[in-house]
Amino acid sequence: MLKTQTQALGQYYTASQFGHLLVNSLEVQSPDTILELGAGEGSLLTAAQNRWDQAKIISVDIDHKNHELINGILPGHSHFLLNALDKNLSKSIGVQSDSVDVAVCNPPYIKSKWKSSFSELLEEAGLSNCLSVHSDFSTDILFLAQNIRLLRKGGELGIIVPDGLVAASKASRLREQLIKNHMLSGVIQLPTKIFQKTEAKTYVLILKKDMTSDGFIPLYKASKEGVIGDPIFIFTEQAVNRLDYDHYFYSKAIKIDTARVSSHKQSFSQEKPLFEIARGNITKVDAQKNNIDFFHTTDFKYVKNINSCHLSDKTKKIFNKNNHIVAEKGDILLARVGRDLDKKMALVTAGQIILSDCVYRIRPQTPEIRKRLWSFISSKDGRLWIKAHSKGVCAQSINKSDLVKLPIL
Ligand SMILES: C[S@@+](CC[C@H](N)C(=O)[O-])C[C@H]1O[C@@H](n2cnc3c(N)ncnc32)[C@H](O)[C@@H]1O
């Protein structure tokens, strides 16, 4: 399917209250130079100009329509119609590398074909060797690197980044390098649905180039009006794992008696894991194509009583022949992807069925473990735990590596 220009260039523009929030979250008092890469229709520029009206503002966008729209709209502003990822950008815009005081950015969340020059951008930003290089590479990370490269030591960047960078396990080395080489002075979780035609979950990262961290990072959550509440402080070591406010907020709200958890753990046999987790291995499309009856995330809505989930036995013959993951009496089912993961769960009390690849099967080692595990998962705290450990931009997902940490109370 052909992409629209909005999709191809990631043209989702920032509403003014979030532009102001980003700009007002920076500490710098009177910068000489402000840079914006991927300036769009200029909402971040306008916010920056409002706050620092004496500064020289330089912006870049690849789209000629944006160039016509914002070229010279502000006093002291120079706009360039260029590719922001060019490694010689500093020359083209007349700015030395390592010289910009403030950079503001909402980069496009698209994929770029990998080029060898990108390694230089990443390396000069202190972000090399922390990402696997594919033919398609996340452009937001390249914009992050280019901004850092152009900033002076101690210069500040406010950048809107997607959920993957903040919470995905595959970005943990990137977070580690960011924190090691620069000072992350705050992360603000923005509300969802703030960009038209996309539900992307996004965050403002505030960082100071080449500065050392205080040892902890404040995480904030912004309202729809662009107002932030009290922060949750996390240690920099925790930040490598994740940087999203909701994770720490829901984790804090869960009341888990850790002494009880460890005493129960010790009372069970540790030779085998206390419970096994398997993910269904047939896609919805394949199951439908092969006329196989299966249990999918959408089937949770038909489960009338989550404590007593009766499955159909129809697939017995098919699953004997093939190597599918089958749920049966005593298993706990959880949705792996989708919305409202904390509400999609069931304890199987009868029947058998093949599971789609969007559903997990948790098989406890003993009835006692089942009882304890299920009473936790289906409780208010268990649901908060699932919310705290879910990740994702539009639909949420939960990883097996997190599920193995489910506490047995
Ligand atoms: C998510 S929009 C943000 C626009 C604006 N900064 C805002 O916050 O409203 C990303 C912008 O980056 C521009 N863009 C995409 N790829 C680019 C590239 N390689 N070089 C420069 N600009 C690019 C798009 O045209 C778009 O205006």
Image (tube, helix red, strand yellow):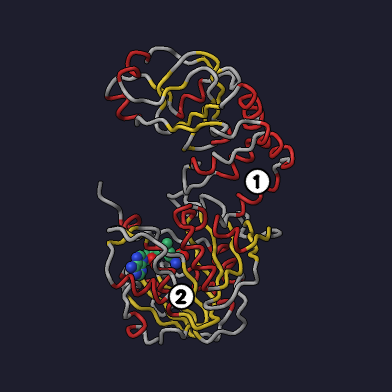
Q: Secondary structure at mark 2?
A: helix
Mark 2: few/some/many CA within 10 Å (<14, 14-19, 20+): many
Q: Secondary structure at mark 1?
A: helix
Position in image of residue 7 (x %, y %): 34, 55
Asked whether 323 or 291 is in front, the reply is: 323
Residue 140 image-quadrant placement = bottom left
Q: CA distance from mark 1 to mark 2?
A: 32 Å
Question: Which quarter of the rendering shows the C terminus?
Answer: top right
Is residue 209 shown above or below 140? below
Mark 1: few/some/many CA within 10 Å (<14, 14-19, 20+): some
Quadrant location of ligand 1? bottom left
Residue, x 67% and y 36% (percent of image)? 266
Determine whether, in the image, residue 360 is placed left or right of residue 225: left
Residue, x 56% and y 82% (percent of image)? 53
Is residue 249 shown above or below 228? above
Could you tell me the amino acid type at mark 1?
Answer: Tyr
Q: Which residue is mark 1?
A: 250
Residue 148's label in the rendered image is 2
Residue 188's label in the rendered image is none
Position in image of residue 389 (x %, y %): 57, 44
